Image (tube, rainbow, N blue to C red):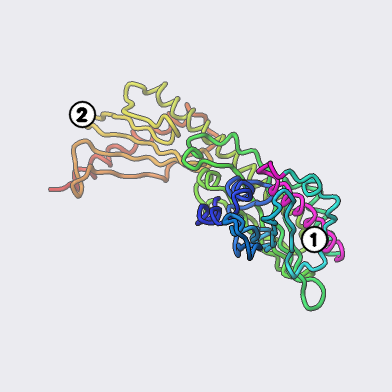
Amino acid sequence: MVPDNYVETIDKFNFLIRPYLDCLLSHPNDKINLTSDPVRITDCFSGCLNSSTKDQLKCDRFTLKIPYAQQILSWQVIFDASNLKEPPDFIFDAEDHDFHPPLADINSLVCWDWQNRESLVAVVTELLEHYQAYQLDRVNSNSTLHRHLRSLLAERPANMQLIVNRAERGLGTLNCLMKVAVDFSSIPTYLVSENPGRDGATLHVCIPYPESSSIQAQLYLSPSVENAFGGSSELRIPAFQSGMLMGDYFANVKGLLENQVRLISEGFEKRKDYIAAFINHLGKSVLEYDVQSFSKITLLWEWNDFFFTFTVELPLYFPMDQPTFILKSVYHNQHKRPYTEKYSDFPYSPRWSGNEMVKRASTFVLATIKDFQKASVNHSDK
């Protein structure tokens, strides 16, 4: 996500610095940012107080705000407008006063390419790798957090950010953000087409203090995946049980997501089979059906010279979730609309084949239509 006032921010900088910032701010990078929260630039100013060149008075230093493990890292980035072929200097958060990355080992700094617009991204990426190692050392200083981390690393999360905050005595809150590598490619295209962008899931775990048994977790889904799952309320992750290690919990959530994708993919194929069975058995009666999601089919039927429509609505998680039957009179209105009744309580098994379901639906209609006809007459507008 591109931050607000992006263009105005870029325009404040020296023209040689702008390409670095444009690349950093406008191009998503999983190695820097695991969430939709954008990297931001604040407190920009020029280090050249006296200069006859107008462009040298443009900003060449700023504070880089990096969303990291559900916290914000504030790193000062210092270019030299009088010598922009040299790499920038960095000043890190005061809270991380003992974070001293070995600059000689940071290849993107040692081999700084001032003509490559991706050079600043490369430096920030490498610095974050060293920052993760710095936080891992802090985690490993506590036996409980070390067990959590060891179990998590055994599950090999696609990407991970963690911060262990300091407390007055020892270590405080641990925030860990993990990319959950799940293959979403089998989700039907129509469910994700309205939300372009990368499909993804990120898990946040918060441990208030090392020995805490009250561990909180939250799952973040990309808009396309959330829409495919039927909304944020449709997927509830389990509570973090006392005594559970972070790796075990991560594996449980990953399994839950994989199962959800499987149910959606299978549901799509099952709905397609169900609609095909109706068309195969009763094709001449079909008025319309949904050719994209296969979630609905409507037929025109006649019983004793009484014409009515029969509609079947298939839910996202069909056949696990039961369909809805709708009968609608062609002749009678109620409140100026065709008289309609919905049914969701009828014999049903998700194990039935599509052909069996069509037979059962037809049997239900034959058993119900007489009462429906009477009701449509008795309750119609006079």
Residue at the location (73% across, 43% down)? Answer: 113
Residue 351, image x, y percentages: 55, 35
In this image, 198 relative to 379: left or right? right
Which tag, 2 or 1, sits closer to the chain's start? 1
In this image, 62 relative to 302: left or right? right
Residue 105, image x, y percentages: 85, 50
Question: Mark 1 = which residue?
Answer: 135
Residue 219, image x, y percentages: 62, 54
At label 2, the amino acid type is: Asp
Residue at the location (60% across, 65% down)? Answer: 43
Residue at the location (24% across, 43% down)? Answer: 339
Q: Main secondary structure of the magenta part?
A: helix
Question: Mark 2 = which residue?
Answer: 305
Q: Nearer the viewer, residue 93 or 320?
A: 93
Q: Badge 2: how crowded within 10 Å, few (<14), some, or many (20+)? A: few
Residue 38 shows in the view: no
Tally the numbered discs. 2
User: Which range of residues does the magenta coloring cover?
Assistant: 114-142
